[in-house]
Structures are given as structure tokens and as C-alpha cells.
Amino acid sequence: MKIGILGAGRIGGTLGKRWAAKGHAVFFGVRDAQSDKAQVLLKEIGPDAKVGSVAEAAAFGEVVLLAVPWASAQEVVQQAGDLTGKVLIDATNRMVSASPGSASMAEDVARWAAGAKVVKAFNSSGFANYADSKYGVQNVDNYMCGDDPEAKAIVAELSRSIGLDPVDAGPLSNAALLESLAKLWVQLAYPLGKGPRIAFKLMKR
């Protein structure tokens, strides 16, 4: 599968490495394709990765991952151009209060990228859990929500391919719940001192 990754930070870079290792073609869209960070990432991944502009990465991807700081998200989505029909995975998190009238980040992204099939996912845990998703015999959960069943099925398969257990959390209107889950993970990991080697797990019986 062709995957365009908007951003080359810890989340985007980690997921890009994992997917490339599974045979997917990844294209990172960044501000400066010649930056040290972008070039190091290319060397680490090898020939299955490319780097270029945000618009080039978005055009390349059948699936597009939005993995940039929230403050840059709207600008990056606008730079991406027409995303109609593409699966757009929103992995962003906003650690400040939402602006008035904004239900969730994912719904904001869906509004900016009209016509895209937006799925909120890969936002509720730290990048290290995406790099190594095993805790003993259990896998880290990847909670996701969206309105398009086929798009969610694709994201679920991308999750499984790197050892994550996908958990369907319902429609995109539930995205605020996943965004709050991310805030809880950060609070537990850092201010409350439990460290980043923690993950949420949905238990069933």
C-alpha cells in the first residue's frame, strides 16, 4: 500500500518505519526535505521511503497519516490539497482546551479535508508503544473511530500489521473521547510519574 505521512516526528517517523518494514511504500511530507531529520529517517528506512513536500506525500498516498503538532494541523491539511476519497488518519493531539464550537480535533480535520474518509487513530499512546507493541503476550490497543467502515477496516489492518490490536470506538463523533484518552495517557506517563512504558488495554470475557 502507498502511505503518505504528513510529518516526520516521533509518531509519523515510527509508524513509517514499521510500515515500510512490512512492505508498504511510504512518502514523508515535510517542510524541508533536505533537513537532517528527514535525511536520517530516509537512511534508517531504506529504499521503501521517499521524502518531499506535503502536497507530494498526500498525492502519493492511498492512505494519508496526519502526524504533526496540532498548531500546524490546519496549515498542513491545506497544503495537502484535495484529499477527496482518501483515507485520512488523524493522529494529532491537542493538549489545550478546544476552541468554542470545536467538538474534536478529528472533526475539525474532517471539515478542513472535505471529502476525505477521516479515521481518528494512533493518537492514544506514546510513540514507543508503536515501535514495540508487545507487553508480554499482549498487544497494545489502537483505538479508532470514523464514519466509513471500509476506511476503518484499512486502518485496522495497518494496525494489525505492526502488532497493534485495533479497537473500533464507533463514529467520528466519538473522537473527543479518544483525544481525552491521549491526555490521560500523558498525565499518567509524565506528571504522575508512571513513565512512557504504559499502555491501555480493553479487557473482555
Image: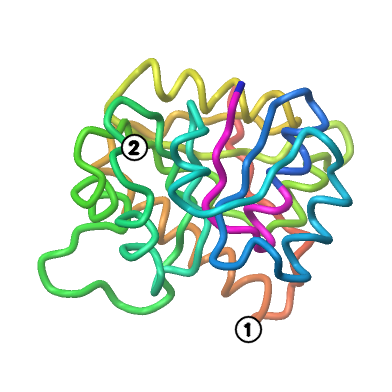
Labels 2 and 1: the sequence-earlier one: 2
Residue 13, placed above or below residue 84: below
62 sits left or right of 8 in the view: left
Q: Which residue lies at the image location 20% right of the left edge and 58% below the top edge?
A: 103
Q: Amino acid at mark 2?
A: Val
Q: Is the residue 8 above or below the residue 154 in the image?
A: below
Query: Does residue 66 appear left or right of residue 24 in this picture?
Result: left
Q: Secondary structure at mark 2?
A: strand
Residue that carries the numbered disc 2 in the rendered image? 118
The picture quadrant where one finds residue 58 is: top left
Give the residue displayed 62% in from the left and 27% down from the top: 158
Which quadrant holds residue 191? bottom right
Element type where label 1 sits in the image: loop
Q: Residue furthest left?
A: 101
Residue type at mark 1: give it: Pro
Q: Position of residue 97 (x, y in %)?
A: 30, 77
Quadrant assignment for the N terminus = top right
Taking depth in this image into account, of 39 and 191 the one nearest to the observer is 39
Q: Is residue 76 left or right of residue 136?
A: left
Whole-Å distance between the Cαs marked 2 and 1?
A: 31 Å
Mark 2 Cα-neighbour bin, 10 Å: few <14, some 14–19, many ≥20 = many
Nearest-to-viewer mark from 2 and 1: 2
Residue tagged 1: 191
- Check if residue 53 falls in the magenta segment: no
Quadrant of the rendering where the C terminus is positioned: top right
Residue 184 horizontal/vertical position (percent)? 51, 66
Q: Is the residue under label 1 in contact with that under label 2 (CB below 8 Å)? A: no
Range of magenta residues: 2-14
The 10 Å Cα crowd at callout 1, few under 14, some 14 to 19, many 20 or more, is few
Q: What mark, if any, has residue 24 been given in the picture?
A: none
